[in-house]
Image (tube, rainbow, N blue to C red):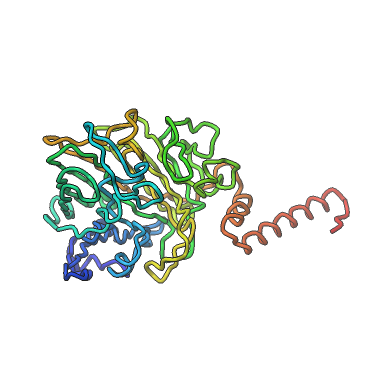
């Protein structure tokens, strides 16, 4: 699945990716930017199937998890690159009240409703309504959710535009209108690994920054417990860059109950009129950098805790724990039941809007891991993923250093 040769192809191409059992054709649209940057989108679930981005040397790699064919996406639901709706994240007990009427949604995550229910927007065939190269390569997809689908009130007409931004970036713009009061929370659920998903690396040494002073502690089921809590002096403080894996072994209840990060970070400024910088992710080895800008009030950071080796993705790679991470811009989880959270309500005559930008670049040199030497961090990383080879190398380095120090002091080292 090498990226296209841009000297011989247009900036936008459209092909058949497969067919659903009822005969519905699912298309793939390729949007091409500068320097080989390319995004591949399929109309099933409005999925981002691939993103090819350059490293510091200009080498391209696919940086999102996905499946090679339509059968893979349809067989096992993992939200890989999917558009999630009507309501992204969780609603407690699958129920909410609107104008005195109580609505019951299908429970598909224990007792709770998750990511739109049993057959959310990620399981729908979207239609291409517009496509072109001017002023930038773009495609617009649409899906109409009928009144009552998955228990949600109102007919919701949704449009989603993917477009190349700044040559090596992707703009994702949602809009929706309804004919009855309803709730809406749409997002993209891409799993990123900036070292490239073709290889065997994980995301534990990716450096992450999130522009949030507070986050939402959750129950074991992922439902917010209370008002936002300050990130100060916790493993959730990403206001300066930290390796994703550096604090996964901390004795923190929130880390333990979700087996890592799976929490909403409350962004500064809440809902904004225009996208602002929400998160920055960097892979020190390749130099690839992803900056997420959004107008949404929150971003769900999920560190791939429940990738369990049951799915084989592109390039024959099995998806395992911490192989990739998600940064999902959104309303807060369980907002319909939390009046103090930024509202997810949409009324007739109003329009829902959500715009996020995924801006790629590359750093010029290898970065250092904040607060820890590379050797120490490798030990932490080996504990998390069982890399015995890394552990043995770190131990050998420690012994060599100890031996050299002992000899310099004129002592005898007994082992």
Residue 183: % across, % down: 24, 39
Numbered marks: total: 0
Q: Residue at x 48, y 50 (%)?
A: 206
- Which image quarter holds the N terminus? bottom left
- Which image quarter holds the C terminus? bottom right
Answer left or right for 243 relative to 399. left
Residue 95: % across, % down: 31, 41
Q: Residue at x 63, y 64 (%)?
A: 389
Q: Is residue 406 above or below residue 74?
A: above
Q: Quadrant of residue 265?
A: top left
Which residue is the extreme one toward the top? 340
Answer left or right for 64 relative to 149. right
Front in this rendered view, residue 218 or 25 = 218
Q: Is residue 108 above or below residue 237?
A: below
Front in this rendered view, residue 376 or 105 = 105
Answer left or right for 242 relative to 194. right
Q: Is residue 378 above or below residue 338?
A: below
Q: Residue at x 83, y 53 (%)?
A: 407
Residue 300: % across, % down: 39, 43
Residue 48: % across, % down: 28, 57
Answer left or right for 194 relative to 51. right
Front in this rendered view, residue 225 or 265 = 225
Q: Residue at x 19, y 48 (%)?
A: 148
């Amino acid at each position: 699945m090498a990226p296209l040769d841009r000297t011989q192809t247009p900036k936008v191409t459209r092909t058949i990716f497969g067919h659903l059992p009822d005969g519905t054709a699912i298309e793939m649209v390729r949007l091409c930017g500068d320097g080989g940057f390319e995004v591949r989108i399929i109309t099933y679930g409005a999925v981002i199937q691939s993103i090819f981005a350059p490293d510091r040397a200009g080498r391209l790699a696919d940086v999102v998890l996905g499946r090679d064919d339509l059968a893979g996406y349809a067989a096992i639901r993992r939200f890989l690159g999917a558009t999630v709706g009507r309501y992204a994240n969780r609603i407690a007990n699958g129920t909410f009240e609107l104008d005195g009427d109580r609505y019951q949604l299908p429970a598909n995550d224990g007792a709770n409703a998750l990511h739109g229910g049993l057959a959310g927007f990620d399981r729908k065939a979207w239609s291409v309504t517009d496509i072109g190269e001017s002023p930038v390569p773009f495609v617009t997809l649409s899906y109409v959710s009928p009144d009552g689908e998955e228990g949600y009130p109102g007919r919701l007409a949704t449009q989603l535009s993917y477009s190349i931004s700044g040559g090596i970036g992707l703009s994702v713009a949602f809009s929706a209108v309804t004919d009855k009061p309803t709730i809406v929370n749409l997002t993209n659920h891409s799993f990123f690994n900036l070292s490239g998903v073709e290889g065997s690396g994980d995301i534990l040494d990716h450096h992450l920054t999130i522009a949030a002073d507070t986050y939402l502690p959750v129950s074991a089921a992922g439902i917010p417990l209370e008002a936002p809590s300050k990130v100060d002096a916790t493993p959730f403080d990403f206001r300066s860059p930290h390796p994703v894996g550096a604090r996964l072994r901390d004795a923190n209840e929130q880390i333990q109950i979700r087996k890592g990060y799976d929490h909403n970070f409350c962004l500064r400024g809440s809902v904004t009129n225009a996208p602002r910088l929400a998160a920055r992710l960097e892979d020190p080895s390749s130099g690839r950098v992803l900056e997420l800008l959004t107008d949404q009030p929150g971003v769900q950071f999920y560190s791939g805790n429940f990738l369990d080796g049951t799915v084989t993705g592109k390039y024959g790679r099995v998806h395992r724990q911490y192989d990739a991470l998600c940064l999902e811009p959104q309303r807060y989880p369980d907002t319909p039941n939390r009046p103090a959270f930024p509202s997810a309500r949409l009324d007739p005559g109003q329009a829902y809007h959500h715009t996020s930008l995924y801006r790629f670049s590359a750093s010029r040199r290898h970065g250092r891991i904040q607060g820890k030497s590379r050797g120490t961090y490798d030990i932490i990383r080996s504990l998390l993923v069982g890399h015995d080879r890394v552990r043995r190398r770190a131990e050998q380095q420690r012994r060599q250093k100890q031996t050299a120090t002992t000899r310099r002091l004129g002592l005898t080292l007994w082992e």
